[in-house]
Image: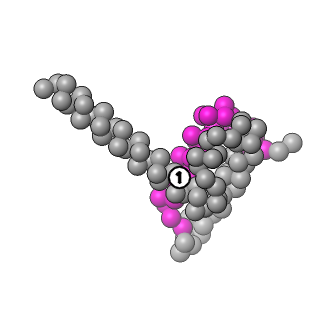
Amino acid sequence: MEGFEQGARQFRARKQAEIDHARQMAAMSLACGLDMAAVLREPAESRIRILRRLERVIERERLKGMRRHWSYDLNRHIALKQVLDRLRDLTGVPASRQAVKPE
């Protein structure tokens, strides 16, 4: 019986990861006009440029939320932040904003 429960937990985790990935791909495509799969294939140097662009998009989204703009979407904001975190992990860029600012 424990094997069945273990399999069910793994299935739910895998499905949740697929849902998260789909949400991130849609947010990246709609908000930035970038294909997430293509971005993941890019070399690290190109991803740093994309990180800067993504940070600007998230900042604009944050400002819309603070101003209670009608087009603000919390789910889009969360998905963009998840994409940013994922790209930072892959690129090895720390979370501080100073690290990805242009010189």
Residue, disc 1: 25
* Residue farthest toward the bottom in the current orientation of the protein: 70
- The quadrant of the rendering that contains the C terminus is top right
Is 4 placed left or right of 103 in the picture?
left
Tell me the quarter of the image containing the N terminus: top left
- Report the side of 71 relative to 102 (left or right): left
Q: Which corner quadrant of the image does residue 11 belong to?
A: top left
Above or below: residue 86 compared with residue 77:
above
Residue at the image point whose x is 76% and y is 38% from the top? 45
Task: Kindly identify the residue that appears in the image at 67 percent across and 51 percent down.
Answer: 55
On the question of residue 69 being in view, the answer is yes
Taking the view exactly as shown, the residue that stands out farthest to the left is 1
* Between 7 and 101, the one nearer to me in the picture: 7
Q: Main secondary structure of the magenta part?
A: helix
On whether residue 33 falls in the magenta region, the answer is no
Residue 17 picture location, percent across and down: 41, 42
Image coordinates for residue 39, horizontal then vertical, percent: 64, 46
**Whether residue 70 is situated above or below residue 58 in the rendered picture:** below
Q: Which span of residues is magenta-colored?
A: 72-101
Task: Tell me the quarter of the picture where residue 14 sits.
Answer: top left
At mark 1, the secondary structure is helix
Q: Is residue 87 left or right of residue 76?
A: right
The chosen color scheme is one colour
Amino acid under disc 1: Met
Left or right: 19 as drawn, with respect to 95: left
Q: Position of residue 91 (x, y in %)?
A: 66, 34
